[in-house]
Amino acid sequence: MVFYRKYRPQTIEELDSEVVRDKLTNILSRPSSFHALLFTGPKGLGKTSAARIVAKVVNCEKLNQKQTAKSRKLSVEPCNKCDQCVSITNGTNIDVLEIDGASNRGIDEIRDLREKIRLSPFQALKKVYIIDEVHMLTTEAFNALLKTLEEPPNHVIFILCTTEPHKVPQTIASRCFHMAFKKATANELVRAFLRIAKKEKISVDKEALFKISEFSDGSFRDGVKILEEIYSEVGNKKITKETVEKMHQAVNLDYKIGEMIKFLSEKNVKKAMLLVDKITTTGVDMKYFLEKLMLKLHELLLVKVGVSGEQSGMDILSIEDIRMLMDLLTNAYSKLKYSVLPQLPLEIAIIEWSTQDQSSVTLPHTAGDARNDLLQSRQNPRSLSERRQSEKKNFENKSKSAFSSPSDGQSNNTLWHELINKVKSQNHSIAGVLRGCSLKSYNEKKFVIEARFKFHKEKLDEKKSKEIIEKALFQIGGKRIPVSVMLKS
Ligand SMILES: [Zn+2]
């Protein structure tokens, strides 16, 4: 079972935040003093757990009460054994209701609630309504709730929880006893981790737990999750500070690789270069990073061709993109050994990649094509330079035939590149627009460009643009061919 759920605090003493423990002890020693509590704060800090403990304290049949020696305060704890306690822990107590504000936000639900609230509890002493994400309620629902809060029956306690306190109307908030759950301190987090480590018999030193607390951003839930992940990885071996650092770096690296792939797909040189810098300064081994990056691309490739399952949110590179990136990265990897700066080969690969036009040319691919493509590239692995050579040759053949042969993907591609290059020497901005478009089809009578965006089409339809493109085509094929631009549907 997930640690966080398994070790949900069941007593006030087990609650992680000291401020919350003190405040709850105070108000629960006088249970008749409040009708409504408002728990606010970020997710994962134990608001719901605390709410359930309150429900138990007010309903427990064998409440543990004692005068604490130190402060002489009355401490109260649920017994966690009586029928009331057990049923509340299991979520089966009919008098303790947990309501999700997000899915019960309408006035009808609240009206219904108001009707039921009037009825006395079945078995418990008090009915407890825990409304989670209370800020999601509609204004009408809030108004209905307010009426109940203004004259609450004695047998009812409300516990309103929210991550967004500013969305709770002041009229509601002012009728509640407010408790803010703050991000946990390192000491509080370590206290919580120790409680779990002890029960699970996890061998871990305190230094390691403090390290985990650094990565938890004040959230018990996040911290406990990290502890659980590390534990499931190392098993019975002792968890040290070094273990935590190493494991966390690995997790972190996955994230950085995701970012790198995103930046590459956007051809965002600046961001990609900054990321390389960050990776270098945080002391990540460049060889290791490149290996991981290529493994990830390989994974994406397998997803693309349907060999393995979905990789959500990562469908941003085409097969051709991935193949080219692999080429560039393999090249970078082989140069790593002799590089003066370890980051240099990757940086060069990024720059080379960003100046490739290939990916902006969208070939009409079908799933079947994609598989054939891959098979071909597997059976006949060619390096980038070899491929460029052959493309050049193709182009030369193409020039001779002067647009007369039927167009196919490969030669379209080459022709398109040549066109962009020719246009570039005349006008950079038109070349830039062309890079965002693709060649739809051509013959001796018509050269059809497909634009993805309306403003691209408009730009290319300008007289000046067409003249430049037609001139470039003339230079390539020795014929004047009228250019037309269509918008991709
Ligand atoms: Zn009890």
Image: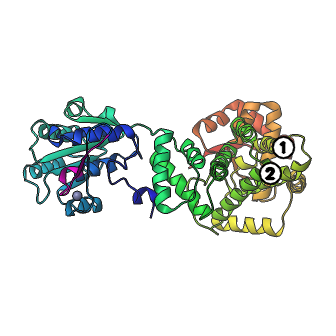
Which residue was labeled with disc 2? Answer: 287
**Residue type (three-letter) at the residue carrying disc 2:** Lys
* Callout 1 secondary element: loop
Q: The magenta stretch spans which residues?
A: 57-69
C-beta proximity under 8 Å, tags 2 and 1? yes
Q: Is residue 333 left or right of residue 108?
A: right
**Does the beta carbon at disc 2 come under 8 Å from ligand 1?**
no
Residue 222 seen by the camera:
yes
* Callout 2 secondary element: helix
Q: Between residue 429 and residue 82, name the one nearer to us.
A: 82
Q: Quadrant of the N terminus?
A: bottom left
The residue under the point 31% across, 44% down is 133
Residue 443 location (% of width, % of height): 75, 53
Q: Between residue 334 and residue 328, name the one nearer to us.
A: 334
The residue under the point 77% across, 51% down is 290
Q: Between residue 265 and residue 96, name the one nearer to us.
A: 96
